Amino acid sequence: MKRKFYTFVSIAVAASLLAACGNTGGKEAEKESAKAGAHHTNSEALAAHKDLNQKPVPLKMERIGPHDVKIEMTAQITDIEIDKGKIYKAWTFNGQVPGPLIVVNEGDTIHFTLKNMDPAIPHSMDFHAVHASPSKDFVDVMPNKSGTFTYPANNPGVFMYHCGTKPVLAHIANGMHGMIIVKPKNGYPTDNEVDREFVLIQNEWYKYNDMDDFQNGVPSYVVFSTKALKTGDRNTNGDTFTLKEEPLVAKVGDKVRIYIENVGPNEVSSFHVVGTVFDDVYIDGNPNNHLKGLQTVMLPASGGAVVEFTVTRPGNYSIVTHQFNHAQKGAVAILKVTETGEDDSGH
C-alpha cells in the first residue's frame, strides 16, 4: 500500500512540475513523464524510447575567455553494451555512459547549455563542482528544448555531475552521470613527479528501468570506464569487459595518477590497485586533502579522489573495488606495466 502511495505521489509531483513549465513543455511531455513513473516498475522502455537509438552527439566545449568556458551537452537515448551481448537502452549525456569528461580550471565561470533530444521526458544537469541555485540553475529542460545556465567553479577537485530531474535515482541509474574535474590553480604538490594520468569512473547497472530494483535491489553489474583526459586518450562506456581486454598501459618505474569518481548511484567503492600502495591521495581531488601511504580509498556514492602510485615491476595490475562482490560483477580494470610502456599484447 505504501509503495502505491509513494508511486502516486512521485507521479503527481512530476506532473505538477511539468505543468508549471507552461509553454516550454506542453501536455505531451506531462503525459510521458507520468508514463515514465509507471514504467519504472515494469522494467520496460518507454513507448517513445523503444525503437530509439540516437547517434552520440559530440560534447562541445570552448574556452571563450581567460576564465570563461562554454559547454554544450546533449541528453539523448542511446544503446550501450554493458556486458557481452547485453544492451541497455540508456538515458545518456552525449550518447555515453558515464557521460563525457568535463575539465575546467579553478575560478572559471561555466556557461552551460543542455539540449534535450529525448522526445518523451525532461532532463537537467546538477554539477557538484559549482555554487548555484538548484531551483533556478538545475531546472528541467523539456523534450526537444534547450536551456542555458551560468555558474562559477571556484573549488578545485574531482566531482560528479548527474541529471537532477525527479525521480533522480531513475535518471542516474539509467545512465545520466559523469565526472567534472576542476584543475587547481596552483596544481598538486606532486605534479612534477607524475608520468602518466588516467581517468576512471565506477558505476552500477540494475534491472532495466526498474525503480523497485533501483531502490531495493542489488546491482546486476558494477563497472569501470575510462574517459579522455587529453586528445588521443581512450573513451569507453561503463561495461564489464573493455578495460580487461584492452588494458591501460604504463612503463616500469612510472608514477601513475588516476582521477577516480564513484557515481553510484547507491554503492560505496573501496578503490584499490593490486600490487602497489598509494603514495599520495587527494580526497575529492582537493590539494588541501593530501594523504600518504594508503592501501585503499573509500569513495561514497558521488565521492572522488586523485590517487598516485608507482609501478616498480612489469605485469598486470588489477584495479578493483575491494568490495569483491562488486569486483565479481565486473568492477575490475587492468593496468598493464611493461618495460617500454607500450602494450605488447597486440592491441
Image (cartoon, grey):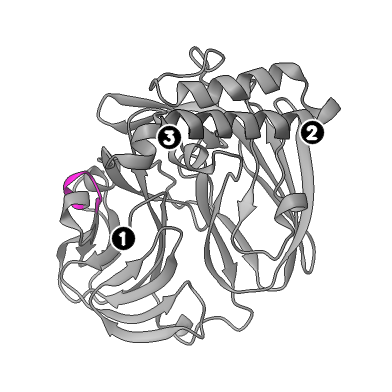
Magenta-span inclusion, residue 120: no
What's the distance in space between the residues labelled 2 and 3, CA to CA?
27 Å
Farthest right residue? 23
Dot 3 amino acid type: Lys
Count of numbered circles on the image: 3
The residue type indicated by label 2 comes to Ala
Residue at image coords 40%, 83%: 193
Of labels 3 and 1, the one closer to you:
3
| Percent of width and height locating residue 98 | 46, 44
Which one is in front, 274 or 321?
Answer: 321
Q: Residue at x 65, y 42 (%)?
A: 124
Q: Nearer the viewer, residue 91 or 309?
A: 91
**Disc 1: CA contacts within 10 A as few (<14), some (14-19) or many (>=20):** many
Mark-to-mark CA distance, 3 and 1: 31 Å
Q: Amino acid at mark 1?
A: Ser
Q: Secondary structure at mark 3?
A: helix
Mark 3 vs mark 1: which is more N-terminal? 3
Residue depicted at 66% across the width and 73% down the height: 106
Determine the residue located farthest toward the front in the rendered image.
1
Q: Is residue 307 visible?
A: yes
- Does 250 appear above or below 82? below
| Numbered disc 2: secondary structure | helix
Q: Earlier in the sequence, mark 1 or mark 2?
A: 2
- Where residue 78 sits in the image (x, y, percent)? 50, 27
In the rendered view, does 297 fall on the left or right side of 150? left
162, above or below 140, in the image? below
Q: Which residue is mark 3?
A: 2
How many C-alpha atoms fall within 10 Å of the one at disc 2: few (<14), some, or many (≥20)? few
Residue 20 shows which numbered tag?
2
Residue bearing the label numbered 1:
269
Q: Decide if residue 294 is on the left or right side of residue 65.
A: left
